[in-house]
């Protein structure tokens, strides 16, 4: 049913058309992968809008159908169920430098009857410029660095430091593994690795030292750690922390982690 017909027959209060161009409606996550990763191709026309719940004004009457193709062909053509949102998971290719997914919508524009009203008229959002899009994800072939700032804090009378989170970047593959960790501070630090397959592991690093995670004395599985905690070997003498304050937090510490596909 066209919007004009719907507004004139099904909706006694009328409707308002809100046209909005959509810049990019397809996505792949993660955008950088290791061979064997699972990738997700997804689309979203709804955004922050909410569909009408009025049975006389059904979003299903306006759903687009999205078709996906890949280059190289890592999956056959996929026609997703009609809807304003959808996704498809597939295995990243074991060879080649990238995979590109082509998104095609059956509707252009895409019309959404929302639950919003303006002056008594229901708002229909119309996503325009819904052209075919090609989204690429690229294979990680080198080491990647992540710099962490371990901000010094007071927790009551104790000194505390913000941990480094290796999962903080949604762009990188979850299958990347730690290669080394460098102490970028002028003091000795105690580093604790956790959140992986192994039990937490702690060690001391001298100023400027980089720890090779493949060292034979480091427990197996430490390379899969996802949380890095750091504290100085000796407490910061300039820090003043108490439950009542005023406080002078300990100095901030910094580390750099190098990661690569396993």
Image (tube, helix red, strand yellow):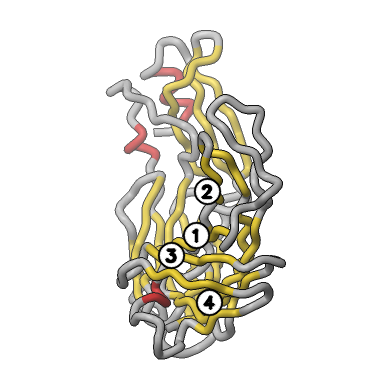
Mark 3 or mark 4: whose residue is earlier in sequence: 3
Disc 3 element: loop
The first of marks 2 and 3 along the sequence is 2
Q: Residue at x 33, y 62 (%)?
A: 79
Residue 258 position in % (x across, y down)? 57, 76
Q: Residues within 10 Å of mark 1 (few under 14, many from 20)?
A: some
Image point 51% across, 34% down: which residue? 156
Please report whichever mark, 1 or 4, sits nearer to the chain's N-terminal start.
Answer: 1
Q: Is residue 35 above or below residue 78?
A: below
Q: Quadrant of residue 6?
A: top left
| SS class, disc 4 | strand
Front tag of 3 and 1: 1
Could you tell which of marks 2 and 1 lies nearer the N-terminus? 2
Q: Quarter of the image containing the C terminus?
A: bottom left
Q: CA distance from mark 2 to mark 1?
A: 50 Å
Q: Is residue 19 above or below residue 93?
A: above
Marks 3 and 1, how far apart at CA: 10 Å
Q: Marks 2 and 3, Cα distance to the nearest angstrom?
A: 43 Å
Q: Position of residue 143 (x, y in %)?
A: 58, 81
Q: CA distance from mark 2 to mark 4?
A: 42 Å
Residue placed at 40% from the left, 82% from the top?
218
CB atoms of marks 2 and 4 within 8 Å: no
Residue count near mark 2 (Cα–Cα under 10 Å), binned few <14, some 14–19, many ≥20: some
Q: CA distance from mark 1 to mark 4?
A: 17 Å
Q: Which mark is residue 259?
A: 4
The residue at which mark 1 appears reads as 229
Answer few, some or many: residues within 10 Å of disc 4's Cα (few below 14, many 20 plus, some between 14 and 19).
many
Q: Which residue is mark 2?
A: 108
Asked whether the residues under the numbered discs 3 and 4 touch, taking CB atoms below 8 Å apart as contact, a structural biologist would say no
Residue 226 marker: 3
Q: Nearer the viewer, mark 1 or mark 4?
A: 1
């Amino acid at each position: 049913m066209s919007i004009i017909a719907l507004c004139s027959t099904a909706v006694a209060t009328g409707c308002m058309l809100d046209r909005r161009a959509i810049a990019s409606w397809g996505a792949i996550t993660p955008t950088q992968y290791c061979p064997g990763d699972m990738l997700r191709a997804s689309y979203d026309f709804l955004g922050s809008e909410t569909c009408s719940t009025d049975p006389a004004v059904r979003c299903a009457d306006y759903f687009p159908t999205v078709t996906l193709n890949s280059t190289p062909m890592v999956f056959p053509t996929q026609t997703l169920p009609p809807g304003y949102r959808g996704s498809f998971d597939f295995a990243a290719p074991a060879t080649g430098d990238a995979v590109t997914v082509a998104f095609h919508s059956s509707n252009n524009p895409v019309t959404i009857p929302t639950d919003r009203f303006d002056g008594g008229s229901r708002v229909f959002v119309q996503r325009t410029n819904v052209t075919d899009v090609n989204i690429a994800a690229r294979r990680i072939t080198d080491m990647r660095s992540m710099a962490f700032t371990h901000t010094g804090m007071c927790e009551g009378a104790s000194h505390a430091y913000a941990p480094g989170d290796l999962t903080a970047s949604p762009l990188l593959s979850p299958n990347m593994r730690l290669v080394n960790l460098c102490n970028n501070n002028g003091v000795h630090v105690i580093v604790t690795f956790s959140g992986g397959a192994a039990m937490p592991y702690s060690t001391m690093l001298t100023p400027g030292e980089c720890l090779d995670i493949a060292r034979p004395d480091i427990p197996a599985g430490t390379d899969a750690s996802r949380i890095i905690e750091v504290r100085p070997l000796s407490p910061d003498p300039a820090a003043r922390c108490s439950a009542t304050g005023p406080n002078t937090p300990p100095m901030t510490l910094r580390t750099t982690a190098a990661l690569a596909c396993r």
